[in-house]
Image (tube, rainbow, N blue to C red):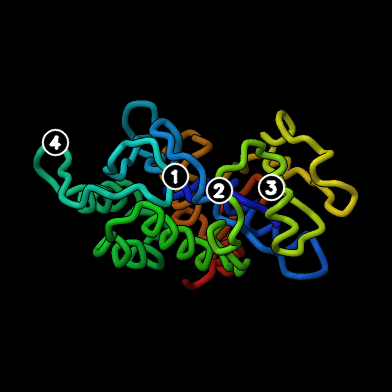
Amino acid sequence: MAAHQPNFLPYLGFFDKLKLTDEMGTEPGTFVIRDDCQYVQRDFHHRNRIRTNTGEGWMWLYVPVEHKMAPIREIQISPDKRVGGKEYWTKYHLRMIWDNYRRTPFFDRYYQGFADIYSDPGDSLREFNMRLIRFIARCFGIGTEIISFYDLGLPTNGSDASETLADIARAVGADVYLSGDGGKGYLEMAQFGSSIRVQFQNYEHPVYPQRYSGFRPYMSAIDALFNVGRIPLSGERLQLSSETAETAVAP
């Protein structure tokens, strides 16, 4: 199993972990969405980056939400928020995506799916993010089971991150926990005992053709989706080709 918070339009490393969760073992894996975690305004819970041809070569897209100390599951979207006091945030997001990606090779294949989700974002940040995550996963051909932390019925006030993750692994019957690279700095292996093996993702961001000159890593995964039509592998150096087009997945 693996776990991650339900970020907004996550970067490729998120989907690489989601994909690996199914590929590591002899049985299908489980990906647990940590919607019990504290919402952090400066994290990626309500924002992410897309490529542009101005400034630093990228820009932020923000989902307008109520900023409060609460689990991500409880954070509500401000549906009537306008950007610059003029354009509704959903229309602004779609316009920025359209303006910066409409000339990419796979834009026409995938854009409408995002437009459909944005047409009714709902009130819950968690639910909106999950709809986007599931859609991108389908576009990448990833079928890993995704469940919510709350579905497991575990305590939500644990003080030890390693103990909570070990409890999640046991709850879903996993014998391997796939951690992100950052786990090397805080995980206490003793909490997992001898029955759960901890493996690290060791993700190396791939390089692939982008719409604008120069390569900018750590964009939202939609950047790779629109440009190459599939999820690049960790460390891959990709050039657009007929082979790339053939491996694109219909949503």
Mark 4 lies on a secondary structure that is loop
Mark 3 lies on a secondary structure that is helix
Q: Nearer the viewer, mark 1 or mark 4?
A: 1
Is 239 left, or right, of 105 in this rendering? Answer: right
Label pair 2/1, CB-CB below 8 angstroms = yes
Give the residue at mark 2: 156
Query: Looking at the rendering, which quadrant does residue 226 occupy?
Result: bottom left
What distance separates the C-alpha of mark 3 from that of mark 2?
A: 12 Å
Give the residue at mark 1: 71
In the picture as drawn, the residue positioned furthest to the right comes out as: 194
What distance separates the C-alpha of mark 3 from that of mark 1?
A: 17 Å
What distance separates the C-alpha of mark 4 from that of mark 2?
A: 38 Å
Where residue 102 appears, as percent x and y from the top left, is 32, 55
What distance separates the C-alpha of mark 3 from that of mark 4?
A: 41 Å
Give the residue at mark 3: 165
Towards the viewer: 1 or 105? 1
For the N terminus, which image quadrant? Answer: bottom right
